[in-house]
Amino acid sequence: MTTHHPLDKALALASTTAGQYQGHTSPGYWNMVGPFGGITAAVALRAVLEHPDLLGEPLSLTVNYAAAQAAGEFMVEAVPVRTNRSTQHWTITLSQADAQGTPQITTTATAVTAVRRDTWSLGDMPMPAVPQPAALPRITPAMGVEWLRRYEMRPVVGELPERWEGQGDSSLSQLWMRDEPARPLDFCALAALADVFFPRVWLRRAVRVPAGTVSITVYFHANAAELESTGTGYLLGQARGQEFRNGFFDQTVQLWNEAGAMLATSHQIVYFKE
């Protein structure tokens, strides 16, 4: 484990009892009013992966952001609520003490881990034909948000509008991405990468409005060996909104490695204000 990497420092958990851990928010992954949602998802998954009763590898992770985390210590609890022959079902909660010292839940999550079988497999959504990462310029982090410095991003299409004039016509983005500095890919890093895209409403409307993820689900299609073979290489991420209505929109994401293997997909629901 590359323990000196900013991601590993942000994911560091100290076990108190089996399934209960203490962590600390990382200023390196700070967003507008709290931690970057992807790092919170990664922390929830780390609690599952460190549990002594873990069966298999991650299959899915759903994270619900009930409240923004404050800077400081937090607690994570991961509970295996049902273990079958090949699947295991988990509930996870993140909490912080309020001013009176009473624990308050900030995040709830569920996860499924599984023992994968070597069976018939097929990818029915091939990676788009795009220029290679080296042929594309790297974008400079903007908006003064610290967590953006933790990722190298090379957009293909769908960058932020140059002018916020309400004339957007598509919510599609494609970009090459990886941790900064480069780090071997694992499940926690992959969970965080599924959430690096800016709100689709900004692109579709070309109006920068307040927005934030309410709930995200990540589906892991790759096993640990496939992530290891990806190494420190880039992932091609593709994101698109599907419906914008009454203050909420959804967003779908696909993540492929440079060899064209789909590693993960995700879906999230996001609120936005006028």
Image: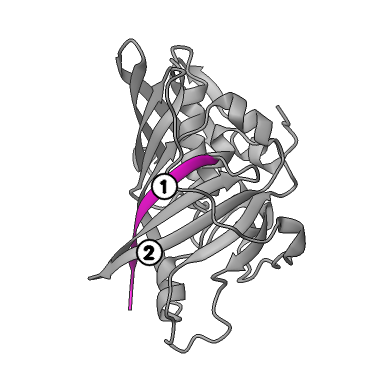
In the rendered view of the protein, which quadrant contains the N terminus?
Answer: top right
Residue 249 figure quarter: bottom left
Q: Is residue 271 above or below residue 10?
A: below
Range shown magenta: 262-274
- Kindly state the secondary structure of the residue where label 1 is placed: strand
Amino acid type at circle 2 is Gly
Q: Which residue is the site of mark 1?
A: 266
Q: Residue 241's mark?
A: 2
Q: Residue at point 44% right, 23% down?
A: 20
Q: Residue 106: x and y, percent?
A: 37, 44
- Kindly state the secondary structure of the residue where label 2 is placed: strand
Q: Residue 125: x and y, percent?
A: 45, 48
Q: Residue 85: x and y, percent?
A: 33, 10
Which residue extends farthest left?
A: 246
Q: Residue at point 63% right, 59% down?
A: 148
Amino acid type at circle 1 is Ser
In the rendered view of the protein, which quadrant contains the C terminus?
Answer: bottom left
